[in-house]
Amino acid sequence: MNLLNPLGLLALLTIPPVILLYLLKLQRIPVRVPSVLLWPRFIQDMQANQPFQKLRFSILLLLQILVLILAATAFARPYYQTRKPSGQSIVLVLDASLSMQATDVAPSRFEAARSEALRIAGALEPSDEMMVVEVSSHTRVLSGFTRDANTLRNAIRAANPADCRGNLREALALSISLAKEKTNTVVYVLSDGATGEPVEMTVPQGIEVRFIPFGERANNVAITSMNVRETYGRDARHQLFIAARNYGPEQVRCQVEISMEGRLINVETLTLPPGQQVQHLVDDAQLTSGIIEATLDVDDDLEPDDTARILFQERQSHRVLVVGEGNPWLEAALAADPKVEAYALEPSQYDPDKPEHLEYDVTIFDRWAPPTLPDGDVLLVAVAPEGGPVTDRGEPFRDPSILDWDRRHPVLQHVDFANVGLAAMMQVDLEPWARGLVTTAAGPLMAAGETERMRVLFVGFNLEESSFPLRVGFPIFVRNAIQWLTTDPSGSEAQAYATGTTVTLRFPAGTQEVTVTRPDGSTELVPVRPGGGAAEEENQATVGPASVSGGVTLTYDQTGKSGIYTFAAEGHPAEQIAFNVNDPEESDVTPRREMELVAGQPLGASGHVRSTQELWRWLAVVALVILCVEWVVYHRRIG
């Protein structure tokens, strides 16, 4: 037994004054009474207080001295050392996804989780260490393992919620990976569990996962989709499509306000049954190029998904040259688009050295192409010349079956390849810069790619030997292809991306940095890099012209907040991009109370360290109990 504060024993000097109080004679007022027969107790007390007489036994004095001894000992802070399990390695996983902004828990689920995280950080023992991981558009380690409480608190305060889903499974996998060499590890998951899908993963034995849930209800209405469509045909008009979903248990009736460049142009009323989605179409919308914004006027627990924005750009007219022996299906699809001026040439008439043959916005080579592709934007149909996105392997493949297609690519939006019949297809190999769009057992059926000098779309089958031209989606495909090839920013006249999407933008040569203005008005300077092709990974998109000779690219992934982002560089027009929530699963803010995790193999036994255990708290408790006993004894004597 040792003392951390030996000077605390000086409090024992208070014992003699207490004893002296029992030796002092009390000043009493004389009062005549008929008899003292009933007052023997007070006579004894009076005798005991005669100065300099021997003290009689007093339980009160004994209890008071014992309290003073305990108090003095507590002030001295006695301690002993013992062997105990080594300090914990704590991983704190803080969910900063969209649903954590719900306000059913005041002020929000995220702020409640932050407060709990700060409490955990403040309760660390000296031998404990902690790491902080944030789950939002990207999994980020805000602080590595440290015992510094201030560092941990600053990391927790630096976390901010995003307007997109977080990958909780990825965060757990990262946390377990970083902690696998530690012993006595605990992973705290602070989340509402609204991940859209069960979080099931193997957790090695020796690592404990504790789920701390937040959230009370699912009261939310969200805009899950918004787009502008142009009807087909020569009398084309614009239609604004809005989809909204009610995630709550009761029917909601609300208004959706539609504005154009900040000017209110329409107000529609929506009735949303509980748990249902409603699709609303504003026909013949009077739209011009600019920012279209739709906002739900509704009282719910989640605000960011109540608003959606798109950048609408009226399509420009394009001149298209078709080189081939004639294809009535292709010519009819082009003729149906009022924004396309189509011209036809036979292969013998085409000369890539003639300037007038290179002045078209798009060139379509149907079953014939020059040996080497010219610069520009090209659609290849059943032909694979040198310099294209594919290399022909030779013999065609008969009766292929389509396995899948990329529904996210702008060329294939609203195009269905299910049950499309093909007599044969070309067998090709993709170039490194190309991307397969439609796949079969024999390889890619369609491919797209771009370089600094061209953007090319490849169709690996004869249209006249397939049922594709008979499908409703064929003219849509042709129009999408022309839009994508003519370098419209997204291949669509209405541009918007999901929050969290990584975008790649192109700028002219000489650009060194780009100023990015976020939706909240804050700005940052981001460096660019030379060259670069199209983004091909999931949750990535390429924005801007397909060909900027000798240009540079900017890859930007800090798009976790919904709204309009502006990218500006000297000598280049500012580029605006809209980001919306558009995530039906993340807008479902229904909280979960548990996560399913599976135990796995042990990581190893935990070690031990010597630990200092102080006793003053226990001594203070005992002293308080004795004081209570002394109070009871005193009142029983005088009662």
Image (cartoon, helix red, strand yellow):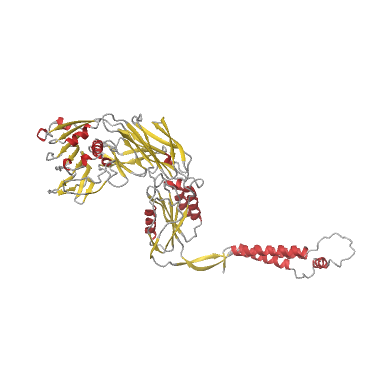
On the image, the x and y values in percent for residue 160 come to 43, 46
| Residue extending farthest left | 348
Tally of numbered discs: 0
Whether 401 is drawn above or below 83: the answer is above
Kindly indicate the quadrant of the structure image that contains residue 582.
top left
| Quadrant of the frame with the C terminus | bottom right
Which of the pair 253/106 is nearer the observer? 253
On the image, the x and y values in percent for residue 616 come to 59, 63
Instruction: Report whether residue 529 is seen.
Output: yes
In the rendered view, does 36 fall on the left or right side of 606?
right
Whether 620 is drawn above or below 553: the answer is below
Kindly indicate the quadrant of the structure image that contains residue 52.
bottom right
On the image, the x and y values in percent for residue 4 come to 57, 64
| Quadrant of the frame with the N terminus | bottom right
In the rendered view, does 450 fall on the left or right side of 175?
left
In the rendered view, does 477 fall on the left or right side of 298?
left
Instruction: Identify the residue shown where x is 30% and y is 47%.
Output: 538
On the image, the x and y values in percent for residue 629 come to 69, 65
Instruction: Report whether residue 570 is seen.
Output: no
Which of the pair 454/600 is nearer the observer? 600
Which of the pair 315/358 is nearer the observer? 315
